[in-house]
Amino acid sequence: MPRTRFTRRLPAAITAAGLALAVAACGGESSTSSEGTAPAAADQLKPNADLSQQSLQITVWDGYTPKELPEKVKAKLKVKDMKVALHDTNEVAMTKLTAPGDSGIDVAFVSGQYAQALNAAGLLEPIHPELIPNLANLYPEATQLSYDKGNKYSVPYTWGTTGICYRSDLVKSEPTSWNDLLKPPAWADKKVTMMTTERWLALPALKALGYSVNTDKDDEIAKVKELLLAQKPHLLTYDDTTFGDKLKSGEAVMVEAWDGWCPTTDAKNNIKFVVPKEGSDLWVDTMVIMKSSKNKEAAHALINYILDPEIHSWAAENINYKVPNKAAMERVRVPKGSLLDIKPAELLNGESIIDLGQASTKYTRLSTEITAQQ
């Protein structure tokens, strides 16, 4: 299965509050509710619109959709054209989507908390469910995501969790707790890695201390910093991209990892994955329609097409990420050792990471301070 690194980082400057200020500065209007989201008014769309008069442009991570998707979409939906712009991180995508003027993007693939921030700034078109009948293919749990309950402005594309990925043949006892990473035993000293992506760097310590992954309390973040600084001398390195290779080589014995990036199907190595007993997160990558799109009917038709089981199952089969589409997952042949069989109810045990507005800067600062200090 081809594997490409998809970064979920949310830069400090791109928070719900920051986006609202940017929109206002550009002459637009933005307001937020007490929950931090202010859905834009839905446009009047035509269920029977002539899609041959519309074109599509999407922005998505490289390798996250089939290369032949544009040709398939043009043949199926009869749109004039479909172009694909690539982003390697959420940061790059958000820069495109929040720049002054029309980005030209109709559909964007971004992670859940970024969709939340875009919606709070009034930049998203509400989802018109009557134009996406394939929403019925989603698991019921996929409509209960805390950042967008009811899929009002986003449609989930992939989802997963974070845990400890480890070499079962090289550990003296199999990990069960985040403390196995944070306070590694002597036999694992300098043989563990952590991710530096802001919210995920903090996640193990937050859960080990019994805190929410969405805390913005200064005293709790200070205790997280203390724990991460104490851990630092015992790390092999910080690694967001090649931790799987370090496990395969034996250089590392335990690493913090997203489930889809733990190479458990590698037949040559005894690699396993565990969600620690203190719990973890639920991450989601979503599809959203930009308010500025001039092709909203085609945008909805595209999302509906992607939710077709034959199309959506491609993501599970090719990038090893679970999709929140029951009909699609029923088509997938799950390889031995794969994490694709984690059930939706198990995923929902994880705590969804949400946008924290200006408080997100606290995690930016934490990451910078932890990784900078020697």
Image (cartoon, rainbow, N blue to C red):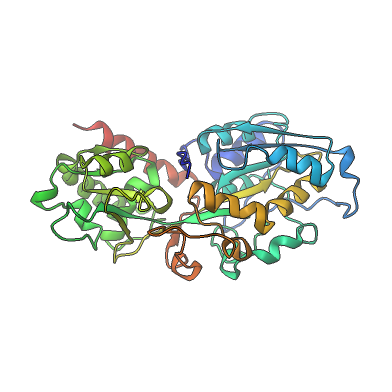
* Residue nearest the viewer, comparing 240 with 90: 240
Residue drawn 59% across and 62% down? 331
Q: Quadrant of the C terminus?
A: top left
Q: Is residue 100 left or right of residue 7?
A: right
Q: Can the viewer see residue 297 in this picture?
A: yes
> x, y (%) of residue 15?
52, 42
Where residue 197 sits, quadrant-wise, is: top left
Residue drawn 49% across and 52% down? 321
> x, y (%) of residue 319?
50, 46
Q: Can the viewer see residue 154 in this picture?
A: no
Q: Is residue 49 left or right of residue 97?
A: right
Residue drawn 60% across and 70% down? 140
Q: Is residue 165 left or right of residue 139?
A: left
Where 166 sits versus 5, above or below? below
Q: Is residue 229 left or right of residue 70?
A: left
Where 140 sits versus 230, above or below? below
* Residue nearest the viewer, comparing 295 with 3: 3
Residue extending furthest front? 268
> x, y (%) of residue 324?
57, 60
* Residue nearest the viewer, comparing 224 with 27: 224
Residue drawn 75% across and 43% down? 73
Where residue 360 sits, quadrant-wise, is: top left
